[in-house]
Each structure stands twice: as structure tokens, then as C-alpha cells.
Amino acid sequence: MPSTVISKFFYDAENRMLKIAFVSGIVYEYKNVPEKVYEEMKASGAKGIYLNQYIKGKFEFKKVG
């Protein structure tokens, strides 16, 4: 299901990094994210809500764009 705030996201399993691009154009990289979290987000019907509940504030991140 499309998100109103997240335009796309990618997971790098080798580096355990989740990259999230927002519709605003801002991109964040979240470090040490388990693949299970990525799979659950991918399956979620509300990706923005999932992000806020299970990723934000739980993983180190940096703004990259």
C-alpha cells in the first residue's frame, strides 16, 4: 500500500542499513536495522505509522539528502 509520507525505502542486508526517502525529498539512513524490521515495514499497510512505532528513536540514523 502506498504511503503518504514515504516515497520509497531500501534495505542493505549486508550492512543492515535501511534507507527511507520521504515525499518531501529528505532521505534518512537507519543503522543496524534487523532484516525482520524491514520485512515487517514492507508488509505493513501503514508504513509511516510503522516507522514511527518501530524505527524512529530506536535506531541510529543520519540525514543524507
Image (cartoon, rainbow, N blue to C red):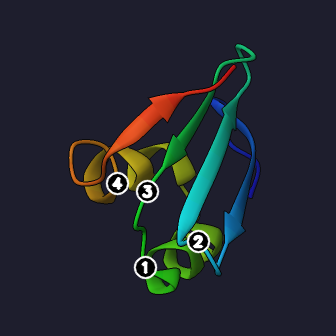
For label 4, count other residues whose C-alpha is less than 10 Å away and answer few (under 14), some (14-19) or many (20+). some
Q: Is residue 63 above or below residue 19?
A: above
From the viewer's perspective, is 42 left or right of 8? left
Callout 1 amino acid: Pro
Tell me the distance, in whole angstroms, between the alpha carbons under discs 3 and 1. Answer: 9 Å
- Foreground: 9 or 33? 33
From the viewer's perspective, is 52 left or right of 44? left
From the viewer's perspective, is 16 left or right of 57? right
Which quadrant of the figure has residue 45? bottom right
- Foreground: 17 or 24? 17
Callout 2 amino acid: Asn
Q: Residue furthest top?
A: 24
Could you tell me which residue is drawn at 64 percent across and 80 percent down? 13
- Foreground: 42 or 11? 11
The residue tagged 1 is 34
Could you tell me which residue is drawn at 42 percent across and 49 percent down? 51
Identify the mark nearer the N-term, 2 or 3.
2
The label nearer to you, 4 versus 3, is 3
From the viewer's perspective, is 59 left or right of 31? left
Callout 3 amino acid: Lys
Callout 4 amino acid: Ile
The residue tagged 4 is 55
Q: Residue furthest left?
A: 57
The residue tagged 3 is 31
Tell me the distance, in whole angstroms, between the alpha carbons under discs 4 and 2. Answer: 16 Å
